[in-house]
Amino acid sequence: MRRSLAAIVAAGIAALSLITGAATASAAPQTAASVQKSFTFVIDQFATRGPNGPADQYIQIKNLSQIPQDLSNFRVEVAPSLSQRFAVATIPQGTIIQPGQVYVIANPQGYSGPVVDQFFTGNFPLTDRLGVALLSPSGITVDSVATLGTSPFVMGAPASPLTTNQPLALVRFTNTENNAIDFHIAPRTPGLPSPVSIF
């Protein structure tokens, strides 16, 4: 009887440790590796420099879906390293993006593009090697891209960074969850959606 009681107690302790461990794991912070492919909003293209110099910067978000989507209170964050994250924009309430349309956020200190929906807040310029993420109002990472392997926002392998002040950007062509495959250096077209689709 004593041996049976000891076995029951041991089993109870083991079960409790499993429950505690599961709770701890579920509370772990989300990483880019755990981000699911987005079928609504994606980072469509971004530039860390341009013909107007190192501050000629923008980030473009696209609605991939077939219906209007509410972008209100989403945040755009950048991460130049594993330990640094900065919010560069919070989308205003009432911002609805139509299917296939884009939303452009730009640096007010140097952006030379023809279209802008919102300017960066704060005074944090984008570096050539960094990560960019779009977060939902509840803080869930919806999509991310990085040109730096140690950024918390990298998905798969990092994309190649921009290195010259040419009219170029990192443009999304596919949606495979691998930054090196999805993003390519191409002519910048702020305000015009890239070729990527939901399919």
Image: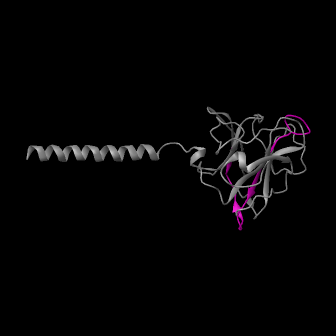
Give how far across and how far down residue 149 sits, in percent.
66, 36
Residue at the left extreme?
Answer: 1
State which region is magenta: 50-76
On screen, residue 79 above or below 155? above
Look at the picture and state if 65 lies above or below 145: below
Residue 17 placement (x, y as % from top left): 32, 43
- Please name the residue shown 83% across and 35% down the image: 163
Q: Position of residue 87 (x, y in %)?
A: 69, 40
- Report the residue at 9% width, 43% height from top: 2
Residue at screen point 60% across, 45% down = 32
The picture quadrant where one finds residue 150 is top right
Residue furthest to the bottom in view is: 66
Expressed as whole percent of the image width and height from the top left, the position of residue 137 reads 62, 51
Foreground: 130 or 159? Answer: 159
Front residue of 120/193: it is 193
Residue 75 in magenta stretch: yes
Q: In the rendered view of the protein, which quadrant contains the C terminus? A: bottom right
Q: Is residue 90 visible?
A: no
Where, by quadrant of the figure, is residue 128 drawn? Answer: top right
